[in-house]
Amino acid sequence: MQTADINLNVISDWTPIGNSTTANQFTGNYNGDGFVIRNLSITANLNYRGLFGYIGTGGVVKNVRMENVTISGADYAGGVVAFNNNGTIDNCYLSRVTIQSSGQNIGGVAGYNNGTVKQSYVIEANIAGSTNVGGITGNHAANGRVQNCFSADGTITVNNTGTAYGGGITGNNGSGGIVENCYSTVNVTGSLVGGIVGYNDQGTVKYSYNTSEILGWEYVGGIAGYNNGGEVSKTYNTADIYGWDSTGGIAGVNYSGEIINSYNTGSVNGYMSVGGLAGTNTNGGIVHFSYNSGNVDGYHNVGGIAGWYSGSSPSGGVVAKNLSLGSSLHSSLAGTRIYCGSGFFAGNKARSNMQVWINSILKTVFSNTYGNDGVEVLTGTSLWTVFQDFDTDVWLNPGGILEENYPLPTLRNMPSGVQNPVLK
């Protein structure tokens, strides 16, 4: 157990505790007891860089406070641990963190996590790497759990224009991985990036939210850049999202995955396949019981709920029981719809007084004209009528009517933070 604050300023290049050799993995219990470790510096451009290099099965690091962390490394770098293999990181707080790496699996708390990270946060962090970069964990493996964590007031940068994943909480959430009760207020920049996860590969993201700008090239989302067969539920985004191809308020791409009980209030801006909830929804992807109240602006395949870009014969998904409530929808090409593409559409609703601009010409919105189904929702309508299909055990309906500057439904049982969606 740590018994006093520790200042590491006399060590210019810290040697991590534990390494990948089986005999040298850390499998003990380190309790920081709330004391602070200051001025950790690692300058060697090597793999497995962090306070701990490698935590093995059963290893525990808890109650650690770290300030002024500076790490340069290659693959696997994290403030607390570079590689967590079936260990537990609990109640660890880091502030003023700079991690600059030329490699992959880079995170504020853990570079690679195949264990549990919980009740931890990172603030004032600038974290960069080539792929799998996140505010809490860089790469979140199949057995990984990130619970009750947040990252705030910093930047996540993915320095790779190819297959690169970056997220406010984790860069890559692997098959079976769970991210829950987390939030991010850090800016994320790169390719295949999201406010919470960059790539959700058959994992689960729930009870989480993002409030900071996301900027990318392709596959850019307020919660997930690319949702590949995973579940995104009970999430919301309030930040503006900017991308080029497949940009969405919740997910840039929803491929065979599910988006349910989620909402977006930020503006969504892209070039092609731009949607209020999903930029591209394909291969049986499902988007339902969710709403968008942000404005959507793009050039080709633009939708208030789902945009689309899959060539001449796209494989459709399911878009059902959603609402498109933004005040404007803008496209530079004719044929833009509230729901754009092919697939199964049912029970969706579009705001009647939305301004739809197509090729600089203002159109009158009719759901049946600019979408494949649905009805118009008139302002002044009771919110209970507008959201009648939404589960009241999940959603808190404020009552009243659908009117500008009036509140919209919020999600129950979310992490700390004020939800204040209003009709714009």
Image (cartoon, grey):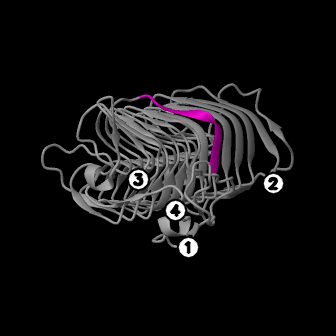
Q: To which residue does mark 2 refer?
A: 33
How far is mark 3 from mark 1, CA to CA? 27 Å
Element type at mark 2: loop
Q: Which residues are magenta?
A: 150-159
Mark 4 / mark 1, whichever is N-terminal: 4
Q: Is residue 44 left or right of residue 203?
A: right
First in residue order: circle 3 vs circle 2: 2
Q: Amino acid at mark 4?
A: Thr
Mark 3 residue type: Asn
Residue at numbered disc 3: 200
Amino acid type at mark 1: Thr
Across and down, in percent, residue 308 comes to 27, 46
Q: Residue furthest right?
A: 4
Rendering coords of residue 392 (x, y %): 56, 73
- Above or below residue 384? Residue 228 is above
Please tell me which residue lies in front, 313 or 208: 313
Query: Residue 381, which numbered label?
Result: 4
Task: Give the residue drawn at x 17%, y 50%.
Answer: 314
Task: Verify whether residue 155 appears in magenta.
Answer: yes
Mark 1 residue crowding within 10 angstroms, few (<14) / some (14–19) / many (20+): few
Which residue is identified by label 1? 392
Residue 74 shows up from this direction: yes
Disc nearer the start of the sequence (1/2): 2
Residue 76 in sight in this render: no
